[in-house]
Image (tube, rainbow, N blue to C red):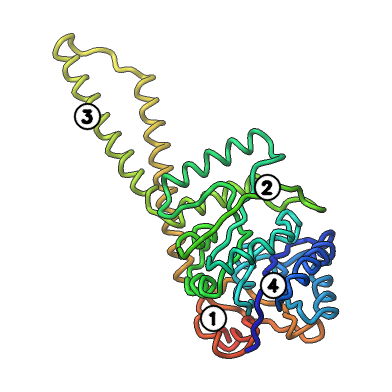
Amino acid sequence: MKTCQVSVVVPCFNEDEVIEAFHRALVSVLEPTRRTFEICYVDDGSSDRTRARIGSLATADRRVRYTSFSRNFGKEAAMLAGLRMSRGDAVVLMDADLQHPPELLPRMLELRQRGYDQVVARRDRTGEGALRTLLSTAYYRAMGRCMDVSVIDGEGDFRLLSRTAVDAVLALPETNRFSKGIFSWIGFDTAAFTYRNVRRAAGSSKWGGRHLLNYGIDGLISFNTRPLRLAIHAGLALALAALGYALWIIADVALHGVGVPGYTTLLTAVVALGGIQLATLGVIGEYVGRIYCETKRRPHYVVRETSESPYGSPNFVAVDADADANADADTGSAPARASADAG
C-alpha cells in the first residue's frame, strides 16, 4: 500500500460554491512544504454539484481521492470515511468552507515534527453574536463538569492526527459517534493553538439551532452516564421533600386539626412530578435507543462511488463498523476494501 507524508481529509456537503477555491488555497499551502500529500474529499450526499466538482478535481490531480455517499449520513460518518481513506503518516481534518484556514497547516506540521500526536487549531469567538457566545460558553462549562473526557471551548474538528492516533480512532466501532469526545478519549500528546475566527467564504452554514442542540445532547450522553445519576438524585430529593411535606402535614393536623386541602398545591405537585418523570423517561430512552442502534450493527454509511470506481461504474458498498479493523493490510481504498466484509 502506497503511503504519503500528509493526508488532508475534507468532509463536504453542498459546498459547490467554495470547493474549487478551497482546493486552490489548500494546494498552494501544501506544495511549498515539500511533503508528499493527498487530499481525501468525502461527499456526504450533496444535492448540488459538489460530487461532480470533486470528481473533476480527482481527474485533474492524482493527489486527489474521493468517496461519495449514497445519501447524507452526517459529518461524523464523513470524517470516519475520510480517516479510513487516508494513507498519510499525518492526517489533517478540516472543513471545505475556508473557516479552517489552510495557511495554518505548516504550523500544525511543525508541531507534529516535535512529537505531538494531536495538534488542535482552536478558534476564538470573534464575530459571533453575544447570545451564541454565551450559550456556547455555558454549554462547554456544563460539558466540562458532566463528561468523562475533556472538551474545550473552541476546539472542533480542525486538527492533525498522527497515524497512531488515527488507528486508535478507527479502533472504536461505536455507531453513535461524537468525534470531539473520541479525540479527547484516545489521549496522546496534544498541542493546541488559537486562531482568529473567520467567516465562510461562500454558501451558508449547515448547522442551525436544532442541529447544534441535538449535537450538544449527543455530546452529553455519549461519554458519561451522569444524566442517569442525576435522575436518581432528583428522585431521592423529591422523595425526601415529599417525606418532609408529609411530616409537616401530620404536625399541622395534630396542632390545628384537619384543614381544607390545597387545590393549587396539589395541582402544582402533580404537574411538577409528572414533568420530572417524563424527563427521566426521556433520558433513559436516549440510552436505550443508543443501545438499540448499536445492536443493529448497521454500517456507518453507504458508498455510491469512489475515485477508484468513478462515474461510469458506480460501486455501491455498505461499510460496516468493523471494516477498518481488518482492512489496513489489504489495499489502499478503505471503502472498496470494505465491500468484501459488507457483502
Q: Earlier in the sequence, mark 4 or mark 1?
A: 4
Residue farthest left in this picture:
254
Q: Earlier in the sequence, mark 1 or mark 3?
A: 3
For numbered disc 4, what is the local secondary structure?
strand
Q: Earlier in the sequence, mark 3 or mark 2?
A: 2
Query: What residue do we see at 61% from left, 67% from top?
Result: 77
Mark 3 sits on what residue?
243
Q: Position of residue 316 (x, y in %)?
A: 68, 81
Marks 1 and 3 sit apart, C-alpha to C-alpha, by 55 Å
As drawn, the label of residue 323 is 1
Q: Position of residue 18 (x, y in %)?
A: 82, 60
Are the two marked residues, 4 and 2, in contact with CB atoms closer than 8 angstroms? Answer: no
Structural crowding at the residue carrying mark 2, measured as other residues with C-alpha within 10 Å and reported as few (<14), some (14–19) or many (≥20): few
* Residue at which label 2 appears: 208
- Amino acid bearing label 4: Phe
Name which residue type carries label 2. Gly
Judge depth for marks 4 and 3 and give the one in front: 4
Instruction: Calculate the distance from the C-alpha at mark 3 to the C-alpha at mark 2.
Output: 45 Å
Q: Residues within 10 Å of mark 1 (few under 14, many from 20)?
A: many
Quarter that holds the C terminus: bottom right
Look at the picture and state if 36 lies above or below 151: below
Label 4 and label 2: CA atoms lie apart by 22 Å
**Secondary structure beneath disc 1?**
helix
Q: Which of the marked residues, 4 or 2, is nearer the chain's N terminus? A: 4
Q: Return the residue found at the far top.
A: 256
The residues tagged by marks 4 and 3 sit, at their Cα atoms, a distance apart of 57 Å
Residue type at mark 1: give it.
Answer: Ala
**Three-letter amino acid code of the residue under disc 3:** Leu
Return the residue at label 4: 69
